Amino acid sequence: MNDRPKKILLGCAAACGVVVILGIGSCLAFTSWLRAPGEMLEEAQMLDSDAVGYAEWRLDLEDAGTKAIVDAAIEAMNGQGDELAMPSFIRVLLDFSNRRQARKLKDLFPATAVWSLYPDAGADRNLYSVSVQRLGHRLVFADWVMGWLLPWAPDEIPAVTYRGETILSLEEGDGKEMADEGSSLHAFLSPKGIFFADDLEGAKKAVDRLAGGGIEIVEESGPSRLERLYARLDPGLPLRGAVSNRRGELVRLARRLEGDGGDGGGGASLDPRLEAALAQVDAVIWSGGPVAGGDLILEVLFFADAAAEIEEPIRARVRALQEAWSVEGAPLEVEVTETADGVGVSLRVVDVAKRISEWRVTGARSAGRLEEPRR
């Protein structure tokens, strides 16, 4: 009779032990799943036949050019304290911190950044997306948490559910009314990345592309003009893009890049000669990115029938860009040539990896941590 309480206690202890082990195992399994690589956007997955502009930059450490620049950035981080006298234990802590930062930086690769441009009666609409393989499962978890917390939010958050995705408005508004009007930035999380759109329809288009919607229609009607332009680009380069200019999209895009907002509002405006030249351009394609050796290149081709008329304004703008880069300490090699299709522009920043190291030293001197070399 005396053995019965002992057996009960042993049984309870064993059960508690099993629960603890299962709890620890579940936590370890969840942590392992959270850190494991997830899904990524496939190449040209967001290229939509309805779009008039598209650019994609795929960054992978298996690419020699990208790896050279990332290695240079890590080396610059690791050398931040080399010029300082410090106790050995501080040096150990600094080295540990540098290794941790380097690991975090490498975890951002492979990654893909995508931009799409859609025509609109008032102003062109943009869609942006960032896909990082290491963040895939974390985005799934964040999306689940957001979906669970959203109904409990104290204030009404404008949100629309479309094909299982919760699309949020990132600006204050009157709930669903603002979301339907498309007057704010819309965003949603997906296992393949984070997506931002200027309007609700753009966000829905992104969801459709992720789900594979519209592929049958594209196959029946054939590739769009933008898809044909994009197909001309070298698939071996990490950065590729194209813009069709049938409705003046290129001029509005140039204004945005110059700080004009793209709608003729305040800010810097385009040179009238450059604006007139861009209005004659039929389309533009570009490709480039980091290449082996540490250089950064960009090849741009402006399609135009009257190449001679647009060459000089483009050449003047490129010269101004070259001068601006030189002031920043990054000599830019440029070449502008007339081709059978229009005007080609080649840009090259030589040895970006070396520039990163030089900027680190310059920054240290500016901060007063380094003395100027004695002569």
Image (tube, rainbow, N blue to C red):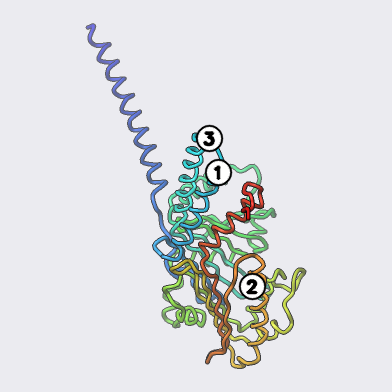
Is 24 rendered above or below residue 197?
Answer: above
* Residue in view at x 31 percent, y 28 percent: 18
Q: Amino acid at mark 1?
A: Leu
Badge 2: residue crowd in 10 Å (few <14, some 14–19, many ≥20): some
SS category of the residue bearing label 1: helix
Residue furthest front as drawn: 375
Is 153 rendered above or below residue 334?
Answer: above
SS category of the residue bearing label 3: loop
Check disc 2 and report the residue beneath it: 124
Q: In the figure, residue 362 lies in which quadrant? A: bottom right
Q: In the figure, residue 261 lies in which quadrant? A: bottom right
Quarter of the image that includes the N terminus: top left
Quarter of the image that includes the C terminus: bottom right
Which of 193 and 74 lies nearest the eye of the viewer?
74
- Mark in front: 2 vs 1: 2
Which numbered tag is attached to residue 149? 1
Q: Amino acid at mark 3?
A: Pro
* Residue in view at x 40 percent, y 42 percent: 31
* x and y percentages locating residue 88 in the rendered image: 49, 35
Badge 3: residue crowd in 10 Å (few <14, some 14–19, many ≥20): few
Q: Report how far apart the C-alphas of labels 2 and 1 lie in the structure.
A: 33 Å
Check disc 3 and report the residue beneath it: 87
* x and y percentages locating residue 145 in the rendered image: 51, 45
Badge 2 or badge 1: first in the primary sequence: 2
Badge 2 or badge 3: first in the primary sequence: 3
* x and y percentages locating residue 307 in the rendered image: 60, 91
Which of 94 and 341 lies nearest the eye of the viewer?
94
* x and y percentages locating residue 249 in the rendered image: 63, 78
